[in-house]
Image (tube, coloured by chain):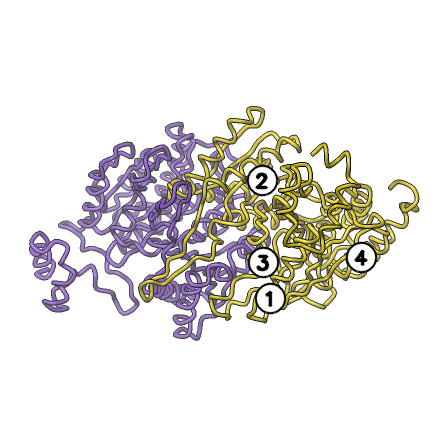
Chain colours: A yellow, B purple
Amino acid sequence: MSIAAARPALFLSSTRLLQPWPGLKCTVYKLKSPAVFCQREKSSYTPPPAKYGGRHTVTLIPGDGIGPELLNHVRELFRFCCVPVDFEVVSVNSAASSEDDINNAVTAIKRNGVALKGNIETNHNLPPSYKSRNNLLRTSLDLYANVMHCQSLPGVPSHHKDIDVIIIRENTEGEYSSLEHENVSGVVESLKIITRVNSLRIAEYAFNLAREKGRRKVTAVHKANIMKLGDGLFLQCCKEVAAGYPDITFDDMIVDNSTMQLVSKPQQFDLMVMPNLYGNVVSNVCAGLVGGPGLVPGVNYGKDYAVFESATRNTGKSIANKNIANPTATLLAGCVMLDHLKLHAYARMIRKAVLKTLSETQLQTADLGGQCTTSEMVHSIMQEIQRGGPRTSGQI
Amino acid sequence: MIMATLTKALKPILGRQLGNAAKVFGAAVSNQRGKPTYTGQIIPPPAKYGGRHTVALIPGDGIGPELLSHVRELFRFSCVPVDFEVVNVNSSLTSEDDIKNAIMAIRRNGVALKGNIETNHIMPPNHKSRNNLLRTSLDLYANVMHCQSLPGVQTRHKNIDIIIIRENTEGEYSSLEHESVSGVVECLKIITRTNSLRIADYAFKLAREKGRRRVTAVHKANIMKLGDGLFLQCCKEVASGYPDIEFDSMIVDNTTMQLVSKPQQFDVMVMPNLYGNVVSNVCAGLVGGPGLVPGANYGRDYAVFETATRNTGKSIANRNIANPTAMLLASCLMLDHLKLYDYATMIRGAILTTMNKTRLHTVDIGGQGTTSEVVQSIMRNIESGGPLTTEI
């Protein structure tokens, strides 16, 4: 890691030289010398190197429903703030049965390292061989950790106050393995896969993040009283990892009790780690508690790649193109992405403007009970940024 | 009666093949309990001599024993014609004899009232959950939970009235897991056509009976296309036979989010086992907690009543602070099932008066009362209703 940091120019040039032969890249590196290896293969993630001129390239997948319009707003806002990010747009047609589109998107993300996406619709009426495109993307890129930071935002009406929960959800296996079969007619077996390797990995990630963010307690959510081997393995892996972090309290809770506690006393939770399906349910419950699906951004982290989207992954077909969708989740996801690319000043600027606009009730969209349209809200965010003063020359 | 004795006589001889034998000998030789009425309701077991029913009572662990003794105390006080046959199940033993005795007692009596039996995680995987064993052996395929906002209880959401019907025997709770490769565990989630049709049928019949307008199926068919896809398809097929009832479906993550923001939109919900577990706990949390909602497990021939969220409550056991409402309301459901409607109405009325008018609440809903104080208050309410025992 230190070698790479000390001689970045050398690495960049050797990367560019070898780029025309993508197939040879990794092999050549290994033969040459251990020092010449891809910056991405290191254990702590470093963002992809900025391209020429200091501008990053990020893959943008519009998706369906409200995705395209909200991502347009993101691009508009980034252009307005002069954020040094270029978007490479890759469209994925959810109605096509061939997997070429999603494979292109995956290749683009492998190339750029970072992506911002809208949700791609999965039509139930298509045959079972048609896999969920979002799921394919996550498993191909091995984005094993889904992180959702749920915070009560001031000014947003909700039944509960002072919620601050980080939910870490295993993103690649569990119930979402898409392995099902019908051996006997009328009897379907769905396989839920839990592996030791992935459970250890997600638990490590959770405890690392907890330590990084100064969190005191990690709660594992499971159903090990019924699924003894499966969730029992998950729980055991969490306990093993917890032993290596004595400064962080670890406890576990069964998923039904967790959801009941979340609904009555969500303030008791700090950081929660869980397998895929429980993560889905719990993150949606938390999103509902802080004000709805339009407010919370979510991130999918892998060893080499990161994909940013709204936490609850809604397509929002019924409100598409009506200019009433809440852009907050997508804009905050954009901010998290800027933090990831180490453009912290831009991230802070945009996030502050978004939260300030949100706390004014007359500028809230319909899902929060307001009357504002999406474009009005984005416009007022831009005004708020402008009011902050000329940033491009000053603080970056 | 003759048929019942004939079946009982054949049982030891034929054992497991009884089902086939019954089909062979003719539809006439069938247990009276299995005969559904035209609405599909099961007939309660016949009252024993003297008009008194016998009900199996499984105390369970944690707060179960103390709450069930309060139930017995209350029934004795109200002169309810029910005798309890107590069957203890020791959850720390590895042998399955205890639970088998309990199952036999329930088969004998037809109805049971139970507390939750603890499942210790530390035990080896072949030690199956006792509650689950009970449900699958007796084929109690429908778990019904009626979630209602009680006016006297402080909650963030008002006017909730949801019936949750959860498939109770298959799905993720099949306890079929294996570790073919070291470090890789496969859990099988089983969805079958027959069980899905059965639970959907039950849901629509119940909706019609109770005059409900809409049934919502909760699923995750975008990911589990074959499994939940089959469940959803079965629900749609059954829905087409009930044109007066509206049917829609919702994905489980969206459902939980909607429940937390706008629970008043839901009417009747039907779903497979695991989603049922989560959704029923969310709803219980919304109306005030696990101490308030009763649950019933119905099968073709048997019915078992318990609290809806099946909590053992180990941390509050024997401290006289547990909320007896859920267990008492479960016993009222049992009385309704045994067609002792007057007693059920009387006890339920007294419980709701204590909850809403007197507002004597236990700690879990923000009050100061102890369990025995609440039960005493309920008994006083029954007494003040006048001498009912002579009128019934």
Residue located beneath label 4 in the image? A378
Mark 2 crowd level (few <14, some 14–19, many ≥20, 10 Å Cα): many
Residue located beneath label 2 in the image? A266
Residue located beneath label 3 in the image? A134
Can you give x and y, in whole percent of width and height, for residue A181 in the image?
Answer: 38, 61
Can you give x and y, in whole percent of width and height, for residue B37 in the image?
Answer: 25, 67
For the residues marked 4 and 1, what is the alpha-carbon distance in whole angstroms?
34 Å
For the residues marked 4 and 2, what is the alpha-carbon distance in whole angstroms?
31 Å
Nearest-to-viewer mark from 2 and 3: 3
Left or right: where A30 falls relative to B56:
right
Disc 1: host chain: A
Mark 1 crowd level (few <14, some 14–19, many ≥20, 10 Å Cα): few
**Exactly how many numbered labels are in the figure?**
4
Disc 2: host chain: A
**Which callout, 4 or 2, points at the residue further toward the start of the chain?**
2
> What's the residue at 47%, 37% (across, down)?
A253
Disc 3: host chain: A
Q: Is residue B276 visible?
A: yes
- Closer to the camera, A388 or B390? A388
Q: Amino acid at mark 4?
A: Val
Can you give x and y, in whole percent of width and height, for residue A360 in the image?
Answer: 79, 50
- Closer to the camera, B31 or A73? A73
- At mark 2, the secondary structure is helix
Q: Are marks 4 and 1 in contact (CB under 8 Å)?
A: no
Nearest-to-viewer mark from 1 and 3: 1
Left or right: where A388 falls relative to A224:
right
Query: Residue A100, labelled with which disc?
Result: 1
Disc 4: host chain: A
